[in-house]
Image (cartoon, rainbow, N blue to C red):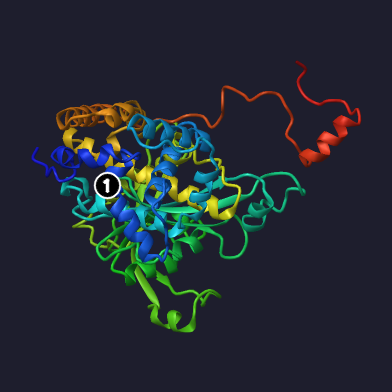
Amino acid sequence: MNHSTSLVPLRQVAATQRQLLAQPGFPFADHLPAAQIHRICRALGHGFRERIYTPAVTLWTFLNQVFDADHSCRQAVARLLAYRTAQGLRPCSADTGAYCRARGRLPEELLVELTRTTGGRVVEQAPAEWLWKGRRVKVVDGTGLSMPDTPENQRAYPKSAKLPPGVGFPLVRLVVVFSLAVGTVLDAALGRFQGKSSGELSLFRSLEGVLERGDVLLADRLFATFWEVARALAAGVDVVMRMHAGRTPVWFRGRGHTKGNRRVWWRKPPRPEWMTAAEYEAIPEWLCLRAVRVDVRRRGFRTRQLVLVTTLTDATVVAGTDLADLYRRRWQAELHPRSLKETLQMDILRGQTPALVRKEVWAHLLVYNIVRTVMAQAALLAEVRPDAVSFAGALQTLNAFLPHLRSARTDEEAARLWGVLLGAIGSHRVGDRPNRYEPRAVKRRPKKYPRLKEPRAAARRRLAQGAKRVGKKR
């Protein structure tokens, strides 16, 4: 198979080796050079002085903190201190105060811009074999994240109203648009977990420019609304979604229709509050769509039949089996957030303020894109699709090779290490488990301690007053 090697940086290692030896952010300095970071900072109006914690060094240290299994600031500063000492540079302080202040000054827009740039660059360089019928497919999905229970976080991202005061944690909702071909994050939106304009649809509508003419939007039935389909059509984008459960069921019998394929018409609903009258008038009165019935004949699967709705109305060009196979690949939208939340440990954030929480989320997305970039390079060499490569395996391999890549002294040694690194990542394949099904239950239960249903300070006062300790005896 003849693929372009524009993604594989083997030829670039010799040219950039001297630069990498002077940077503490490898592999981040390779994908995010200091010149690019400082150029964006100046464009954003962010001034800085040439100290140890320049924006580039601060960003690389921040990304190393996310990349490391130990997410503490002390570990991130210790890595920087060890690197500078080993390179004969002036050691930085082991105290984390200077780094935390520099991280607080880092513009959030810098992380946003770099995330979008790195994600889109891999998609642009993807071979045609990775696309779906020559078109780029973008998948949207949402998830929720938790954060420390500080007063600032509570005001910005309040917890569930059903919980009493002092109990529970602030929650943030995250909606992400992924590339189906390479798995990178193309854009994201954050908001409150509840309240007006905080749902996944509202956050998705706030993402401007993520859908481009010729794209295909793949989503679950939450997004199968008249407004989302009309918005996609206006941008020249086709959609493939599961029919919303609130719509009238489609009857797949009648003259001029095949057994599992039918043309449907959606009429424009009344104008919602969030839409202006001019926007409402610009939307057509009717949408002509195609409904496709998919029978799921797999033992153990909960769903027996589902109905897909799409703007790809020509069955001679896109068959129903093509749409069924494409929608099945939508499961990648569930696996990507799992890689972010479990493998990169983004499920429970550490930021004490809303600004730092947002930066932490974007830093995770940026690290995720960089790992996905290396995975795309490895998949190209292994002649497989990127979704066949294990994200956890790539992260483990990068962590294992990182110290040796930093200590490489010659161009040949760096090139050899990088080549072995890509080969090892390409060999870590996702397990082939077709039609897998599992019960929604856990075998290993947590410890038998009750949940804390009151503020911790109140519980400690009760214990200090001689109250009986509740829970498992030790």
Query: Which percent across, then down, holds residue 297?
Result: 37, 37
| Front one among 44 and 326 | 44
Task: State the residue at coordinates (11%, 42%).
Answer: 3
Tell me, yes or no, if residue 304 can be seen here: no
* 332 relative to 239, above or below: above
Quadrant housing residue 22: top left
Amino acid at dot 1: Ala
Which of the two residues, 354 or 392, is positioned nearer the viewer here?
A: 354
Q: Is residue 420 visible?
A: yes
Residue 390: name its quadrant: top left
How many residues crowd mark 1 within 10 Å: few (<14), some (14–19), many (20+)? many
Q: Residue 104: horizontal and vertical position, in percent? A: 52, 52
Quadrant of the frame with the C terminus: top right
On screen, 299 above or below 370? Answer: above
Q: Position of residue 271 (x, y in %)?
A: 51, 77
Give left or right: position of 134 versus 175: left
Pick out the residue farthest to the left.
Answer: 2
Q: Position of residue 464 (x, y in %)?
A: 87, 30
Which residue is denoted by mark 1 in the rendering? 181
Nearest the viewer among 169 and 153 is: 153
Q: Residue at x 49, y 44 (%)?
A: 99
Q: Element type at marker 1?
A: loop
Position of 194 relative to 336 (above/below)? below
Q: Residue furthest right?
A: 465
Image quadrant where residue 129 sits: top left
Which quadrant of the rendered structure holds the N terminus?
top left
- Residue drawn at 35 percent across, 47 percent down: 294
What residue is drawn where x is 46% and y is 57%? Answer: 108
Q: Is residue 384 left or right of residue 243?
A: left
Tell how many labels.
1
